[in-house]
Amino acid sequence: MFRAIIIVLLISFITASAQDKKVEADASERIIVEEIQINFSAMSPTGEFVKDVKLDDFVILENGRLHQPVSLRYLPANVLILIDVGSDVSYAKRRKISAEVAKNLIRHLRDEDLIAVMQYTDKIEVVCNWTSDKSLLLSKINENSLALGKKSAFYSALIEAVKFFETAKSNKHLVVITDGVDSFNNKETELMAIKTLLSSDINVHVVSWSKLQQRTIEELLKTMPNIKKIDLPPGAEPPVRGTSPTVSIKTINLDRELIKKRKEDIQRLKRSEQLLTVISEDTNGEIFLPDSETEMIEKMPQLALNIDSQYTATYIPKKSLAEAKIGEVRLIEVSSRREGLIIQGKRRLIITKNPKP
């Protein structure tokens, strides 16, 4: 998300007399300095955070054009954890595990980081507001304190999450624990959520239930009960009880509607997984698709390290934002110029408004 910094220079001519002095601003000039902000992680080849990155150590590309950074800061992170507690598709998703995932992430984030927690079903609620008090956060997250609802307003929750970041100035990270399924299937809300995220400077990380959900459904489909049905030719009489039928026998499932629903749920989960992957890639985040509950919890130290290994840089775009068309897309990438420094920073920015003087 860009920010326009307006510097007002007042050039005043002062006239004085023996009796009094008057100060008047005869002329003023406004200069708009546009800056775009992007995060990037800085790691060594062995996976350790590099603490001494300088402006000369990296460059920024915007749509392939080289830009020099104008500022670099290493700041505490603002981390919002968004937990999906809807049960629209809930074959494997459990509140208890989602709570443990969130708690393990909190334990491994830096003490200086500000953290908040939200949850959503068909409603979006704040569990804990911005705080660095980990004890408070951990006390508010457990299976019993989290809500439970039948539906999931995933896209509306993303929009509310972006609004929640309005008080955070920089280094913003949204961690979503979800399967990505939205119960309301509203295309307009979906597009609005994606546009809202891509026009912000929020880094989106996803801890997805998708693989676990899909695998559980597939296992259930394999164990669905079957019965034998006698397929009689036209005009034939059913066999008398106790006798053997002389017609062909076919096997059908007892509950075709249930099978149909479960297969549809698999398709919904696959689509949401694809979308979550794109969102995380386009917002300089990452996605975790664990195969087990244990893996889901154990991945959180890695996510915490990645969040706390990020710098915030700014640059002035060569193509003016003030002249950009609404809806214009800019691909921003950060590349290392220093040997042994591994930098990862990439986001897709959608211009939704122009800076105003």
Image: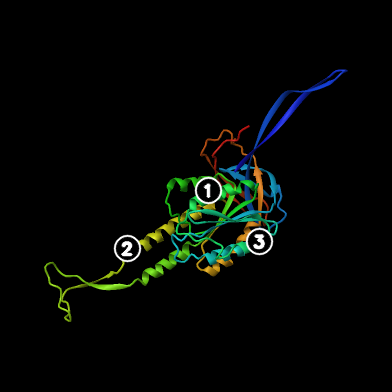
Q: Quadrant of residue 71?
A: top right
Seen in the picture, residue 330 relative to 18 is either above or below; the reply is below
Does the rendering let one see residue 257?
yes
Mark positioned earlier in the residue sequence (2 or 1):
1
The residue type indicated by label 2 comes to Glu
Spot occupied by residue 47 in the image (x, y as percentages of width and height): 64, 62
Q: CA distance from mark 2 to mark 1?
A: 34 Å
Does the rendering let one see residue 48?
no
The furthest residue to the bottom: 242
Tell me, for residue 311, which label it has, or none.
none
Q: Nearer the viewer, residue 125 or 268?
A: 125
Report helix, strand or loop for mark 1. helix
Q: Residues within 10 Å of mark 1 (few under 14, many from 20)?
A: some
- The residue to which callout 1 is attached is 159
Mark positioned earlier in the residue sequence (3 or 1):
3
Q: Nearer the viewer, residue 41 or 230?
A: 230
Q: CA distance from mark 3 to mark 1?
A: 26 Å
Q: Residue at x 75, y 26 (%)?
A: 11
Q: Residues within 10 Å of mark 3 (few under 14, many from 20)?
A: few
Seen in the picture, residue 14 relative to 320 is either above or below; the reply is above
Q: Nearer the viewer, residue 131 or 204?
A: 131
Mark positioned earlier in the residue sequence (2 or 3):
3
Tell me, for residue 136, which label it has, or none.
3
- The residue to which callout 2 is attached is 257
The furthest residue to the top: 18
Do the CB atoms of the residues marked 3 and 1 lie less than 8 Å apart? no
Lateral position of residue 262 relative to residue 190, left or right:
left
Q: Residue at x 58, y 52 (%)?
A: 203
Q: Residue at x 74, y 28 (%)?
A: 10
Lateral position of residue 187 relative to residue 176, left or right:
left
